[in-house]
Amino acid sequence: MWAWLELLRLPNLFTVPGDAVAGYVLASGGQLRPPAVLLAGTAGLALYCSGLILNDLRDCAEDSIWRPERPLPSGRISREKAAVVMAILFAVGLLAAAAAGIRPLLVALALAVGVIIYNSGLKSVPGVGALIMGLCRALNVLLGAAAVPYGAGTAPALVGAGILGLYIAVVTQAARAESHPELAQGAAWAVPLVVGVGFVMMLAFVWTSPAAGVVGFLCLWAAAFALSFVPWLLLESRHYVYLPRFFLRALALPHRFPSPPEGVPGPSGFLPTRDAELVARLRRESISLLVSLLLLMQAALVVGRGQTPAAWAAGGVLLAAWGANRLAARWIAGS
């Protein structure tokens, strides 16, 4: 069982149902119909899990070099069994979407095609793979929006889907640094840019209460940005002034250590060579944290758009899911 949780990257699974919740609330203006949201969320989660398995099946040879401890290259899960479970999850996802209606089914089919295209080899193409991954995340949001009856507003859902999709595209590009450093150039610097653009678009097209939106958004992101530096602070607290710069540059340029500013010990004094594995682990934890921030963005979208008891309750659940994500990430890698 533990091997399957590792294969499916348990922490990241908490971020998937929130897409359907956010999409539904954005399209409905704050209303929630539990059966429709549950079906859309189940469809998205099943397709997401099937995509994860397909990804590891295609990357098994590469993982045997870079990540030999992963379930498939280590032999803890056979490729045959993984392929069977993947096919079952694909079927479950499409059946759940069909039960939600024809529009969710069409979106689910597009999502399934996107998952297959991503794993067909295009994910290794600089920029293209990240954009396809972002598109898949956007389609997952639209899967929830499609479950809303005809006549509902779609513009806020499209804006929200675009914001979350673009954010994941940037994070995906940064995550490629783990085995392809040359593909991650500048990705870390794009994260604040995406957040800033997303803030403006949310304020203009999504939030019904601008003042509440500004306060909520800034509070969530201030906390999240501060938390992103915790691993480095624990590693070497006496260089805390230098850490933000080191964090961003290490994430964007992982193939070499950054040059320290004058007066700060160099790499040999800051991070010895023997700690290279620790750097890689902390980088993976940083990527996992960036992915988890989707839950905070989903909560901000839901509460800001809805302003209803149902929306507030959903936002609270999403915030609780973020806590569960961080707890699970202590034992299982999300990247």
Image: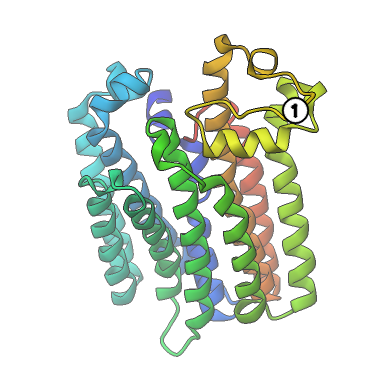
Q: Nearer the viewer, residue 58 or 275?
A: 275
- How far across and how far down the image is residue 129, in percent? 33, 50
Front residue (pair 216, 34)? 216
Is residue 136 visible from the viewing direction of this image? yes
Q: For the view shown, which residue lies furthest in the left direction?
A: 80
Question: Disc 1 residue type?
Answer: Leu
Residue lying furthest top in this view?
Answer: 274
- For this orientation, the residue located farthest to the bottom is 151
- State the residue position of label 1: 233
Q: Is residue 157 above or below residue 185?
A: below
Q: Position of residue 255 (x, y in %)?
A: 47, 28
Which residue is pictured at 48% across the width and 86% down the height? 152
Q: Quadrant of residue 219?
A: bottom right
Q: What residue lies at 55% left-to-right and 31% top-to-bottom? A: 283
Q: Residue at x 62, y 12 (%)?
A: 272
Above or below 70: residue 273: above
Query: Where residue 26 sits in the image (x, y, percent)?
Result: 55, 75
Q: Residue 76: in sight, yes or no?
A: no
Residues 154 and 185: in front is 185
Badge 1: few (under 14), some or many (20 or more) residues near its Cα, within 10 Å? some
Q: Is residue 273 above or below residue 121?
A: above
Quadrant of the rendering where the N terminus is positioned: top left
Task: Give the structural element (helix, strand or loop) at label 1.
Answer: helix
Query: Is the image coloured rainbow, by chain, by secondary structure, or in one colour?
Result: rainbow
Q: In the image, what residue occupies the spot 43% across and 24% down?
A: 2
| Location of residue 76 in the rendering, given as x and y in whole percent from the top left corner | 31, 18
Decide: is 1 above or below 118. above
Total marks placed: 1
Drawn side of residue 93 relative to residue 259, left or right? left
